[in-house]
Amino acid sequence: MISRKAGRGGSRRDTAAQGVNALPLPPNDAARLQTPVAPGWVEPLPARVEWIRDRLERVAFSRVEVANKWRKVKAKADDAAQNVSADTALGAAYDAGRIACEAVLACHHVRVRSGHGHHERVFSAVAAFEIAGCANLVADSEEVRIARHESEYGSELATDEDVRHARAWMDRSLPVLRSALANLDPELAPYLP
């Protein structure tokens, strides 16, 4: 069963206070962006999500939280484009795509609980919402996900080819995911650079 928590638990900071300050907003936009993103609860969840239902959690995300997630996406994408180590660029490209997926899930007021296979479940959950261009998200992300995992936790060093592949995947995925966010909640569009 999916929990419907008001908060997220843990030592979570007050996102309402920090989020508005993190966005360059005209004063009259602050209150509007504190409200939950448009789609609200989706009941029932798509049948394709059933296999991970026990790993999903219902959370009411505000527009500020979604916009801030997208700002993180852009920062990671910028990091991936820099002339840094292959391991760092690979991780940044991968994180940009993953965080973008988390932003899409936030628009559906869903997040994937942490645990083994968390990242694959994030991609699977986005694909389950049948967003145009995201049907093959799990398969498309698999090679990048494996390379990033080996780079992060294994003894393998990322190669230039790994980085090229990760950047190409990121460059294909981000416009589709940004478009999905703008379609899910058109009021977010101006805050998704």
Image: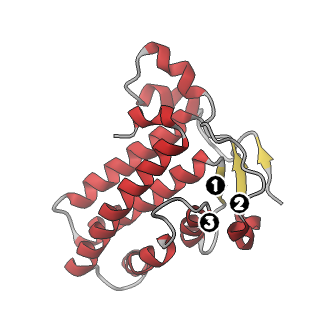
Of pointers 2 and 3, the one earlier in the residue sequence: 2
Q: Amino acid at mark 3?
A: Ala
Q: Quadrant of residue 190?
A: top left
Which quadrant would the C terminus be assigned to in this image? top left
Residue 40 lies, with reference to residue 76, above or below; the image says above
Question: Cα distance, mark 1 to mark 3?
Answer: 13 Å
- Do the residues under discs 1 and 2 have CB atoms within 8 angstroms? yes
Residue on which the image places disc 2 = 56
Picture coordinates of residue 143, whole percent (x, y): 40, 81
Residue farthest to the right, as pictured: 1
Q: Amino acid at mark 1?
A: Arg
Residue on which the image places disc 1 = 111
Residue sitting nearer the eye, 111 or 12: 111
Q: Quadrant of residue 34?
A: top right
Please report the residue visible at 62 percent of the width from the left and 65 percent of the height from the top: 128
Question: Cα distance, mark 1 to mark 2?
Answer: 6 Å
Drawn side of residue 92 relative to residue 112, left or right: left
Residue farthest to the bottom, as pictured: 155
Drawn side of residue 100 relative to residue 53, left or right: left
Residue on which the image places disc 3 = 128
Residue sitting nearer the eye, 40 or 94: 40
Local secondary structure at mark 3: helix
> Is disc 1 surrounded by few (<14), some (14 to 19) or many (20+) residues within 10 Å?
many
> Is disc 2 surrounded by few (<14), some (14 to 19) or many (20+) residues within 10 Å?
many
Local secondary structure at mark 1: strand
Residue sitting nearer the eye, 43 or 14: 43
